[in-house]
Amino acid sequence: MISHGATSHGALPVVITPGEPAGIGAEITLAAWADHRSELPAFALIEDPSRLTALAKTLGIAVPVVTIDDIAQATAHFADALPVLATEYTAPIKAGHPDPANAATVIAAIEQAVALVQSGKAAAVVTNPIQKSSLHAAGFKHPGHTEFLAELAGPGVQPVMMLACPELRVVPATIHVALTEAPRLLSRELIVELGRITAEGLARDFAIPNPRIAVAGLNPHAGEEGGMGREEIDMIRPAVEDLKKLGIDAFGPEPPDTMFHAEARARYDAALCMYHDQALIPIKTVDFWGGINVTLGLPFVRTSPDHGTGLAIAGTGTADCRSLVAAIGQAARMAARRAAADLNAGANSKAGA
Amino acid sequence: MKPRITLLLGDRNGIGPELAAKLLADDSVYEKAEIEVMGDPAVLAEGLAVIGSNANQNRYRVTEFLPVDGIQTTRAKETAEAGAEMLACLSHAAKRVAAGEADGVVFAPLNKQAMHMGGLVHDDEMRFIANELGYTGAFGELNVLDKLWTTRVTSHVPLKDVAANITSEAVLVSTRFADETLRAAGFEKPRVAVAALNPHAGDGGNFGREEIDIIAPAVEKARAEGLEVEGPYPSDTVFVRAQRGQHDAVVTMYHDQGQIAMKLMGFGQGVTVLGGLPVPITTCGHGTGYDIAGQGIATEKAIQNAFAICVDMARSRLAAV
């Protein structure tokens, strides 16, 4: 990969996608700029500038919007106005009511954002939440954002979803499936793969050189030596052994109910969880507002807020922008670490990279 | 009238005796109840020695009960003798409440392995006590942290078998049970939330249909019975809502759904209520702490909470008579 993260002009801007236009994406981005721009890196939002201006007016948030045609201009404008890369929607936007007619615009914005980061013009991609049902109705074939981004990233990419807040990081091994499906989708290989990518991601993007990975059990009390399920014995423990052989500081399987309180959390850098709610219950309980979603394993940096499209409250100005703000800040830090690493690697291979 | 609470020392080889001693050293407990310690006075003395306090000695009664001849304390070891003692104490204390000689029982942590070694043939102490009392009605364990109660539809089963055990009837029984137990603990109209089974409560049927086919109908039925019940709620946010005081109880579908959140919110502080039995009985949510037994460092928060809840339950029971 070529080095592009840091230039003599400083850090590159972050590009933000609109997500579902009938959801809260635009308004939380307006709020993020209005209330948090001094603490955030420069970012640009892909949106329809006139509708964004109208939305700001409706919500009574004083946000000047500036349309830019090259994301490089975002940095110069950012202190005074929210930089926007213009796009157009096919159908009018009605808050709370997604229209599949706008799916093509939503998808194109994601593609544009990935192209910007892949070509070295943006530091990272932050995605606002999409309404999957609306995109699927329009023919979108991917289960979600993460899979689509992986495809855009190129062949051989294995994306891993990690949820993070300052106190806890969790990686669910199975995600949006019925609880009864989750055990069938788990395997020793999957756990090893996720553990490996998580460890690499933490080392590369979070500056944790030897990450400690706690692997959760699947069953109550981690199966109690087979008395309440055998997955720990047959699959999870061997996977932990495999990870150790790879030189990764992994341990487990841990009883799920005693691994998330503060004292237990101090023993690891990320918890590898077996199913969605095993990961989501603790992180939402620890930090309801500040959690973010980070995709590990991609050739570029991508984060997002860890909430949905908020259709029920869209357009009311009550949506909380804290998760998006945290996602933008985290994306910039990750990008800076990659840029510094790339710069070092470049300096070693060819002078003056 | 203050309720009469019987305090049992639990597993004499664990942290039970020192926790009992710490509870007795707390002046405030005597304002709420008349306390009687039942068991081996020598074990109580061991607990008092660990914490180095004989405070309030005139304020509680000690009822000697020595069911196992020649028993010795062997700290941090499961022994059949200690197990037999735990069972005999539970049975005797529960029967005395049933006979009107006391109003509630609080016990310090028990060791399940020791109880099995000491003759327990039931799965747990709760079934044992029900059997000793000849009680055949519905009963179940509830976990309590501060003001939040949880009960569960399935408990110690492999995760893959959970869904097969979730039926409308089972959800309804757990919901009614939560309502009844909270009423028995003094809640006038308990606000009960029912958790979903699947991520995002099934996302409209995309990740499982149990919410639509099983849980929602059970919630409707409970509401038709006049219970203040809502749900199914996604399990990653229902505890946040409950923590904010929007619910008094959460009916969970499986063991870790409730236990992850409860232990995260208050590790070592939770209480286990043996709900449904004709006798108020509560204990600590934590175990016997063999690794720290005898050091005096075990925290008494959970046994204090267990005591407070037992007092509430005993009061409601006295008021109902």
Image: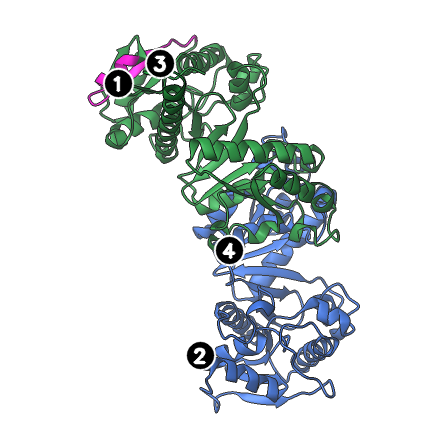
Q: Where's residue B151, x and y in %?
A: 61, 55
List the residue tagged with mark 3.
A121
Q: Are marks 4 and 2 on the same chain?
A: yes
In front here: A103 or B120? B120
Question: What whole-number distance in Å separates the C-alpha atoms at marks 1 and 4?
Answer: 58 Å
- The stretch of residues the image draws in magenta is A72-90
As displayed, is residue A288 above or below residue A92? below
**Chain to which mark 2 belongs:** B
Quarter occupied by residue B41: bottom right
- Asked whether disc 3 touches disc 1, contact meaning CB atoms under 8 Å apart, the reply is no
Chain that appears blue: B
- Marks 2 and 1 sit apart, C-alpha to C-alpha, by 66 Å
Badge 4 or badge 2: first in the primary sequence? 2
Question: Label 2 belongs to which residue?
Answer: B26
Give me the chain letter of mark 1: A
User: For the residue marked with disc 4, what is the amino acid?
Assistant: Asp
